[in-house]
Structures are given as C-alpha cells and as structure tokens.
C-alpha cells in the first residue's frame, strides 16, 4: 500500500467512525478519493443521506487533508445494476474499482440476463 492509499484508508476509517447510525457493510474506492458507500437495509432519502455523508467527509478533510467523495449505494441498487436509476454511475464504480474495504458478500453486482 503506497502512502496515499494508506492516508486514504485512514480517512475512510475516520469517515466510517462518523457514520455509525448507518449499516455500512462495505466501501469501494473507485478512483483516487471517490468511494461507493455500500448501504444495507431499507433505502433512505438519497439527498439527505448524501448530505450527511458529505458533512462527515468534510470533517474528515479538515482532520486529515484527504478529500474523499462518498456516494451512497444501497445493496438492492448494487444487485440490480442495469435497472437502477443511475446505472452509468454503478457501472463506472464496477469498472474503476481500485480497492475494497470491509468484506462484501458479493463484490460484483448481478447482471440480469440479456
């Protein structure tokens, strides 16, 4: 793990510590500092969740100098990749995945038969 990856992991760990009110089974780093935050449970309001994550990420930036950009992705969205509201984003996460933190039962989404 290079120094930037180590710093990013530390920032992600701090971010996760701030997000204890959510069930987060995994994180996928899909570009230098963009993270897909895998959410378990019932889907919540996306904008409210994204705003909460953005606030936590901003606090992490002030503490660490690492500017992570979290995107909430609920498990059901991940499992039905091609039928989601934003399939392009999810396909980009799959394509650009760099590293995964916390073990996910199924790291790749299921694709419906074509």
Image (cartoon, rainbow, N blue to C red):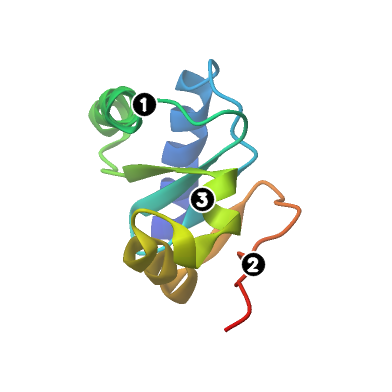
Number of numbered labels in the structure image: 3
Q: Residue furthest top?
A: 21
Horizontally, residue 54 falls left or right of residue 110, namely left
Horizontally, residue 91 falls left or right of residue 110, namely left
**SS class of the residue under badge 1?**
loop
Q: Nearer the viewer, residue 54 or 11?
A: 54
Neighbour class for label 3 at 10 Å: few (<14), some, many (≥20)? some
Residue 4, given in percent of the width and then of the height, sits at 39, 58
Disc 1 and disc 3: Cα gap in Å?
A: 14 Å
Q: Nearer the viewer, residue 4 or 107?
A: 107
Q: Residue furthest right?
A: 105
Q: Residue furthest bottom?
A: 114
Residue at left 53%, top 15%?
21
Residue 68, given in percent of the width and then of the height, sits at 31, 44
Disc 2 and disc 3: Cα gap in Å?
A: 10 Å
Q: Where does the C terminus fall, quadrant-wise?
A: bottom right
Q: Is residue 92 above or below residue 78?
A: below
Image quadrant in which you'd find residue 88: bottom left
Residue at left 34%, top 32%?
46
Q: On the image, numbered disc 3 is attached to which residue?
A: 77
Q: On the image, numbered disc 1 is attached to which residue?
A: 45
Q: Nearer the viewer, residue 96 or 9?
A: 96
Q: Is residue 111 above or below residue 84?
A: below
Residue 110, given in percent of the width and then of the height, sits at 64, 67
Badge 1 or badge 3: first in the primary sequence = 1
Horizontally, residue 14 falls left or right of residue 79, namely left
Q: Are marks 2 and 3 in contact (CB under 8 Å)?
A: no
**SS class of the residue under badge 2?**
loop
Image quadrant in which you'd find residue 95: bottom left
Residue 58 visible in this rendered orientation of the protein: yes
- Tag shown at residue 110: 2
Neighbour class for label 2 at 10 Å: few (<14), some, many (≥20)? few
């Amino acid at each position: 793990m290079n120094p930037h990856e180590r710093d990013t992991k530390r920032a992600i760990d701090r971010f996760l510590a701030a997000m204890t009110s959510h069930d987060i089974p995994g994180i996928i780093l899909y570009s230098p500092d963009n993270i897909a935050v895998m959410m378990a449970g019932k889907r919540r309001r996306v904008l409210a969740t994204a705003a909460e994550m953005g606030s936590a990420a901003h606090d992490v930036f002030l503490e660490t100098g690492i500017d992570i950009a979290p995107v909430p992705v609920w498990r059901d969205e991940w499992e039905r990749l091609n039928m989601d509201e934003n399939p392009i984003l999810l396909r980009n996460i799959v394509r650009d995945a760099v590293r995964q933190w916390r073990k996910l039962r199924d790291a790749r989404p299921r694709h419906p038969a074509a």
